Image (tube, rainbow, N blue to C red):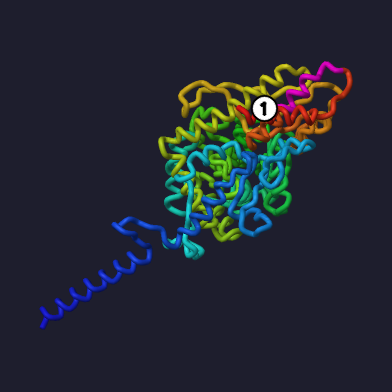
Amino acid sequence: MAKLQQSSYVLCLAFSVAVNLYLIFNLYGHGAGGQWELSWSRRAAEEAELVAAVPCSGHGRAYLDGLVLDDGKQPGCECNSCFGGSDCSQFLTDCESNADGGDPYFLEPFWMEHASESAILVAGWHRMGYSFSDESYISQELERLIRKVHDIAGNAVTQGRYIVIGAGSTHLINAAVQALSSSSTDNFNSSSSSPASIVVTIPYYALYETQTEYFQSVNYKFEGDGSLLNLSSGTKRVIEFVTAPNNPDGKLNKANFQGPNSAAIYDRVYYWPHFTPIPTPANDDVMVFSISKLTGHAGTRLGWAVIKDEAVYQRMLQHTLISNLGISRDAQLRAMKLLNVVVEGGGKEIFEFGYTTMRKRWEKLKNTLSLSNRFSLQKDEPLFCTFFQKRRGPSPAYAWVKCEREEDVDCYKVLQEEANVYGRRGSVFGAEDRYVRLALIRSQDDFDILLHRLNQLVSKEDDSQPQTYINNVTTHEFLRRKSRK
């Protein structure tokens, strides 16, 4: 009897396995000869390929979630600055040169060259729950890749550190402020009940002030320039934003405040080999990074913080969960796919591509402004880079331009009126308006137009009359010649 029951169990098990194999075989599809064929994913793959194949004359892109032409079927082009028409072939002769925004399109050609490795296609039922199966809110594989990419770049110590992810560095900046300013924090040796002072070094990223004042917490207050802070009481709590490399001038800033009543939040989103020499791995208490300036995918909205202290980590984690209930599983999946490409070959491809692109742009910009007595650039300091194993200069994301003439008190206005170039005013960064920030990380079209207009402006410095922006025909001719190369 026992042998009969055992035989029945074996028979049932074999039948179950056979049925499941049959269903899997038919669900996912195999063609003749046992070759794998796409089934449910075929339509999505075809749609993605169709959109990616739209050329847009090389001056724009079509997107799956973008514009659709009048027929309701064909994807439409979204054109780069100064280009228009249904296929982006029309040069807009009266356009503005956009050097304001920080969209990192300079890395777009890299990802087009790595289309198959970086593409993702997911099922409609992918990760529908709030958390992962282990009840966590961060993919273990994503965390592993974050640690690995830092190890490859040599730009941060992650061993023995905690990692929190957020909706971009913006989300984590406020999480760090909340965590460090909490009245229950043990990061300060102070019994003061007054709000912690949030300080910066000028010039500074404007979001620090905007965000701090927007949330209006009783635990902290934005005080601005740290050099003006009165510390005579000796009990004031200070939280310092340290941006390294700095936005807008690219300097590797260091904390100015030390001691038991001081804490620093290091914003290191630009601390990658594209933008700066990496002299040593950063080993700060709180460091913020983002995928935006690593891979160029600003729209994915994913950043991470590397944290030494467990209590600070727990408070930052709590903030991200309360404010956002974790970070999009889709964003984490895309970031994981991108980081897999980054770490292939020891990060050599993307970092060399990014650095070469930025270095060439800086060489051209320096050559142009070296002929000018009216405009100057920030000074840079070559350092030994442990990633490239050589001494090299920085190649920052932004040019911090100063108008040197006494009468040019508003550099933004000078560039706008005389070159039709739009940057970002120095006063936005707490500095004088003799300064203006110009973004160098936008598309190649953006950079070429910016450089051409600056060349024209500098070439006319000796003329006695103020100049209007570039001759439109000259600009169009320049781009026509460029397309022939």
Boundaries of the magenta span: 452-463
- Vertically, is 406 above or below 287? above
Give coordinates of residue 201: x percent, y percent: 69, 34
Give coordinates of residue 217: x percent, y percent: 70, 54
Residue 71, image quadrant: bottom right
Decide whether residue 378 is among the magenta residues. no
Nearest the eye: 8 or 131? 8
Numbered disc 1: secondary structure: helix
Q: How many marks?
A: 1
- Vertically, is 252 above or below 290? above
Q: Residue at x 51, y 27 (%)?
A: 279
Q: Quadrant of the N terminus?
A: bottom left
What residue sits right under mark 1 in the picture? Answer: 481
Nearest the eye: 465 or 407? 465
Question: Dot 1: within a 10 Å radius of its alpha carbon, few (fewer than 14), some, or many (20 or more) residues?
Answer: few
Residue type highlighted by circle 1: Arg
Residue that lies at the very extreme toward the bottom in this rendered image = 1
Give coordinates of residue 118: x percent, y percent: 48, 46
Say whether residue 389 is visible.
Answer: yes
Q: Residue at x 54, y 41 (%)?
A: 295
Say whether residue 430 is visible.
Answer: no
Residue 419, image quadrant: top right
Secondary structure of the magenta portion, mostly? Answer: helix
Q: Quadrant of the C terminus?
A: top right
On the rendered structure, is 71 left or right of 147? right
